[in-house]
Image (cartoon, grey):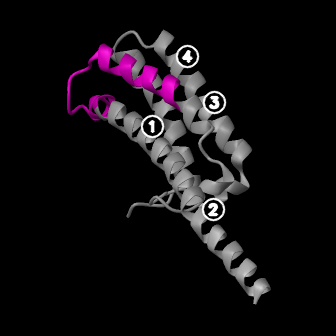
Amino acid sequence: MRTFTVAALFAASILALAPVASAQNLEVIKERKSLLKEMGKATKAPGDMLKGATPFDLAAVKAALAKYQENAPKIAKLFPDDSKTGGETEALPALWENKDDVTKRFEKLAADAKAAEASITDEFTFMDEFPKVVGNCGACHKKYRKDDK
């Protein structure tokens, strides 16, 4: 009987800890999703400019580039193994098989955004340089993110 009681207490303690581990995972997922959404929001105005839907606004372009430089290095660190599932993550399993590549892609995004910030001075340089920066996003989404459609 004593063995049963010890085993039952052990099992109960494991179950009690499960929500804590899960909550940590959800916090990481929530943080990376928030940072990615910030970058998406910052991309809206320049994206509309690229389509010709809104007039060129250098300040909005610079703000987007600054947001990429700020968030990309943070996001690169937010893919621990214990955040593969849950929290409505859109990350594909391939991401965890290629974490070095993912980290390098976020580093490249930040570096390309910094270079573009220095080279974009008008609408013409924007049209040439900005697609190169956001191309980083699309390439990563294609390989490591679930398709929304």
Rounded to the nearest angstrom, the CA distance separating label 3 from label 2 is: 21 Å
The residue indicated by pointer 4 is 115
Secondary structure of residue under mark 1: helix
Camera-nearest residue between 26 and 92: 26
The residue indicated by pointer 3 is 107
Secondary structure of residue under mark 2: helix
> Magenta segment range?
45-71
The relative height of residue 37 versus residue 2 in the rendered view (above or below) is: above
Q: Nearer the viewer, mark 3 or mark 1?
A: 1
Badge 4 crowding class, 10 Å Cα cut-off, few under 14, some 14 to 19, many 20 or more, is some
- Asked if the residue under mark 1 is in contact with the one under mark 3, i.e. CB atoms within 8 Å, the reply is no
Q: Amino acid at mark 2?
A: Pro
Camera-nearest residue between 7 and 140: 7
Q: Residue, x 60% and y 22% (percent of image)?
A: 111
- Horizontal side of residue 41 vs 1, given as left or right: left
Secondary structure of residue under mark 4: helix
Q: Residue reaching furthest right? A: 3
Q: Amino acid at mark 3?
A: Glu
Residue 139 visible in the displayed image: yes
Badge 3 crowding class, 10 Å Cα cut-off, few under 14, some 14 to 19, many 20 or more, is some
- Location of residue 148 by image quarter: bottom left
Camera-nearest residue between 123 and 141: 141
The relative height of residue 17 versus residue 129 in the rendered view (above or below) is: below
Q: Residue reaching furthest bottom? A: 1
Secondary structure of residue under mark 3: helix
| Coordinates of residue 91 in the picture (x, y in percent) | 54, 56
The relative height of residue 32 versus residue 96 in the rendered view (above or below) is: above
Disc nearer the start of the sequence (1/2): 1
The residue indicated by pointer 2 is 93
Q: Of helix, strand and loop, which mostly describes the magenta segment?
A: helix
Disc nearer the start of the sequence (4/1): 1
